[in-house]
Image (cartoon, grey):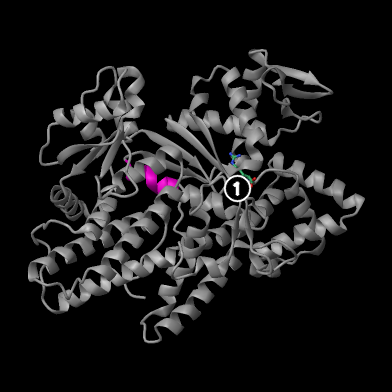
Amino acid sequence: MDYKAYIAERLHVEGVSPGEIASALAVPPDTSMGDYALPCFKFAKVLRRSPVSIAEELAGSFPADDVVEGAAAVGGYLNFRINKRGLAEETLCRIQNEGTKYGSSDMGGGKTVCIDYSSVNIAKPFHIGHLSTTVLGGALYRIFDFLGYRAVGINHLGDYGTQFGKLISAYKHWGDREEVEKGGIHAVNDLYVRFTREATEEMESEAREYFRLIESGDREANDLFEWFKRLTLAYVEKIYDRLHITFDSYAGERFYTDKMEPVIRELEEKGLLVESQGAKIVDLEPYGMPPCLILRSDGASLYATRDLAAAIYRKNTYDFDKCLYVVAYQQNLHFKQVFKVLELMGKEWAKDLVHVAYGMVSLEEGAMSTRKGNVVWLEDVISRCVEKAYAIISEKNPDLDDKASVAEKVGVGAVVFGALYNSKIKDIVFSYDKALNFDGETSVYVQYTCARANSVLGKAREKGIQWKDAETLQPCAQEFDLLKALAEFPETVKTAAKTYEPSVIARYCVDVAQKFNKFYIDCKIMGADSDMVRAFRLRLTEATLQTLTNALTLLGIGVPEKM
Ligand code: ARG
């Protein structure tokens, strides 16, 4: 239930719309006076009266019912008290009925959202810099899907460019088929790194020739390229599995090879393409940006050229309502330019393209995990986190069954949550110890809370206690705080989607877990004074577990039953 809207609809303030009232309503820090408060000084000017007299008059005219019990004027504030038992009943029933669907909605009405994320580069390391795009994109994908959109996940592979010519040249000189097959992406990357260090003039020109051969469809060059691509994808797909990431399309940059020509022609026809020092550009000076480079003087296309073709292709193929690009803020200018060029081409849908920018992730000092030089491979970070999780779990609960699978959920969860907990634009420093702190604002804290709830429910089951049809009682303060938080989940998911901020859900998880733990410690569940109270609390416990499970699942984090 959206209480703010409910109150706003029933409160009549002359010259003020319900929407304005709803947004003025606040949750007071101390809810002993009321659950929502309207600061009436906001209307003093329009009504030409003092906040105190406005509050008093409104209090007298507010119609109490069984949703909002009443309104009281205190100073210049109008405080509303909601019917706690009514909220409890509605929330518990809804969670019970909707189960794994609790929090979902049909807000999207089947509209399509394309999400370009992860977008790895073939033959290059899948490093910690790809963490955010991968998990943010994956979370947004699930969130939009949950809200009734058709989500299309696109891995815009970096599989185009002269580096593949270099790679072929390096392989021809130093490579060994079996070794590369065995070493996979690491062996491929080694060859590339060796080329950048040791290539002679001769090899450089050979590399250019190989790239040309790939372009012109030469069989051998393309077979080699496809092989490198296969090795890279086999490797990253294993990581995607661990992170619960999926895609609907792997159409990468190379896919647009034959789709750029028509775009260039269209730019030309629309008089947007200008010659500049032999290159072809779109002038963006009037918009305060450097020119968007479309063709180099040697006729080669660029990253932006392929993004223009990709945007048009996606619009034609998916007819998206929105197309998101989950890419680091280093590419802010690139996307501003690409979006602007599309707008200048008269694509009215250019307004539906959104660069979902995020900050950098680095490892805390001294925590460098190195397989090679100074590149931190994402796989190493995940594996180390899982190892550490295993050690902690074994110490805390030596008798736990299936420690490896619990450690996988906890370790992967820590990496994912670490990348999602802060507002996405912030740079973050990942710390293994902080991410695995059982008492911190962490996924393991939330997972542990779920395990605790599970264990209480298990004990009740063992004793043959039934709670599904338990009567809803007048909740105490701790129960009510928790219930109110549970009731906010559907709104929270929507906010996360509207702001492209999975962090909203991550923070919500911690908030609910904290409220549950307060309830768990202050109120006896199994040891309640009466059967009725115990059953009600078990019902609340199960509802909490369901809500937290739904929230963690949206983020791509598993929930171990026991910990
Ligand atoms: N492969 C690029 C990189 O690693 C990211 C691609 C993002 N998507 C796009 N459509 N430009 O920087």
State the residue at coordinates (73%, 28%): 293
x then y, percent, for residue 129: 62, 54
Q: Position of residue 526 (x, y in %)?
A: 18, 74
- Give the extent of the magenta segment: 140-147
Return the x and y of residue 501 as percentages of the image width and height: 46, 44
Please name whichever residue, 72 or 452, is drawn nearer the observer in this view of the structure.
Answer: 72
Kind of residue sitting beneath label 1: Gly
Quarter of the image where the C terminus is located: bottom left
Quadrant the N terminus occupies: top left
Quadrant holding ligand 1?
top right
Q: In this figure, which residue is indicated by the disc labeled 1?
A: 359
Is residue 30 visible in this depiction of the protein?
yes
The location of residue 548, given as percent across then percent down, is 32, 59
Residue 399 in magenta?
Answer: no
Q: Which class describes the residues within 10 Å of circle 1: few (<14), some (14-19), or many (20+)?
A: many
Q: Is residue 267 left or right of residue 408?
A: right
Question: Does residue 49 lie above or below 326 as drawn?
Answer: above
Q: Residue at 55% of width from left, 16% of height from top?
A: 346
Q: Is residue 109 visible?
A: no
Up the image or down, 527 lies above or below 223; here it is: below
